[in-house]
Amino acid sequence: MTETRDEIIRRSTKEDSYWRGVWRRLRANRMAMISLFILIIIILSCIIVPMASRYQTYEVIPGAANKAPSSQNILGTDKIGRDLFVRLFYGGRISLGVAVAVTAMECVIGIVLGSVAGYFGGIVDTVIMRLSEIFMCFPFLMICITLQTVFGKSIKTLIFILAVLSWPGIARIVRGQILSLREMDYMEACRALGISNRRQIFTHLFPNVLAYVIVYATMSMASVILTETSLSFLGLGVSPPTPTWGNLIQEARNLMVLQNKWWYWIPPGVMIFLSILCFNILGDGLRDAIDPKMQK
């Protein structure tokens, strides 16, 4: 049974109205919009500054080691003479890129497993949920440190480890939503029409869970940035000379640097703080916009 043209138009209009309503409620949240604006500025700066700067990320400036901020080097130079301004924003590319990649991978894993568990139930649901509980019982940071040590420090390894350890959260959210949605009347109609299980899950169920996935992904970005920063600060994340906000702030472990060379650690610290704060505020705003009943 196929939809008529009028039915397709009505369904499209309803979907458009829903997302317009979400956007309208989000725009009414001033803090969420300010956070979104700041994040856009940070992301654009991380893309543009390394390309526009007269210094290269790995370029050593002769005779310019440990220079304080000046008109030539806005944020000074590091101990071997590399410009910290361009390294700050190139490091942002890496940190934000890792966060995007990890969030995307964990959402794919979690959505697939959560959808299968919620739709089929029974033994399939039990196995997947027990597996997720096992992963959630791991001491997250210690397992990350152990696996990074065993498999080697690289960006790909870091992304894979963080994604594999992080999927249970989104899987449980998706499963919970699908458990309730699969009992709706329209799903009964789908089963009566003989629509395949795969199509029922990914065409008729998943679009109704997408809004919650977006909220989760926004907050997950903040969590991944913090985790990557922690690992890089400990020397177990992305290895130098590739800069990230975490290994840039690592210099603050030296007391002399902490006291006398603020340009080493304050700028990456501010970027980490702003990014995490803005992602969390934006996530809260999206949650309230998507489900107005959750507004305080």
Image (cartoon, rainbow, N blue to C red):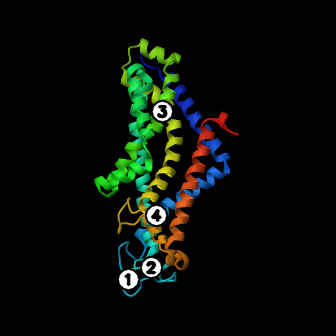
User: On the image, which quarter does residue 104 sit in?
Assistant: top left
Circle 4/circle 2 CB separation < 8 Å: no
- What residue sits right under mark 2 in the picture? 77
Circle 3/circle 4 CB separation < 8 Å: no
Q: Residue at x 55, y 51 (%)?
A: 279
Q: Residue furthest right?
A: 296
- What residue sits right under mark 3 in the picture? 172
Q: Distance between the Cα atoms at labels 2 and 1?
A: 9 Å
Q: Distance between the Cα atoms at labels 3 and 1?
A: 51 Å
Q: Disc 4 or 2, which lies upstream in sequence? A: 2
Is 87 in front, or is 226? 226
Q: Distance between the Cα atoms at labels 4 and 2?
A: 15 Å
Q: Distance between the Cα atoms at labels 3 and 2?
A: 46 Å
Question: How packed is label 4: few (under 14 Cα within 10 Å), some, or many (20 or more)?
Answer: many
Residue 112 seen by the camera: yes
Q: Residue at x 41, y 36 (%)?
A: 134
Is 292 in front, or is 19? 292
Circle 2/circle 1 CB separation < 8 Å: yes
Q: Disc 4 or 1, which lies upstream in sequence? A: 1
Of marks 4 and 1, the one in the foreground: 4
Q: Which mark is residue 245?
A: 4
Q: Disc 3 or 1, which lies upstream in sequence? A: 1
Quarter of the image where the C terminus is located: top right
Question: How packed is label 2: few (under 14 Cα within 10 Å), some, or many (20 or more)?
Answer: many
**Whether residue 186 is situated above or below residue 272 in the rendered picture:** above
Q: Amino acid at mark 1?
A: Ile
User: On the image, which quarter does residue 54 sit in?
Assistant: bottom left
Is 32 in front, or is 158? 158
Q: Residue at x 54, y 70 (%)?
A: 266
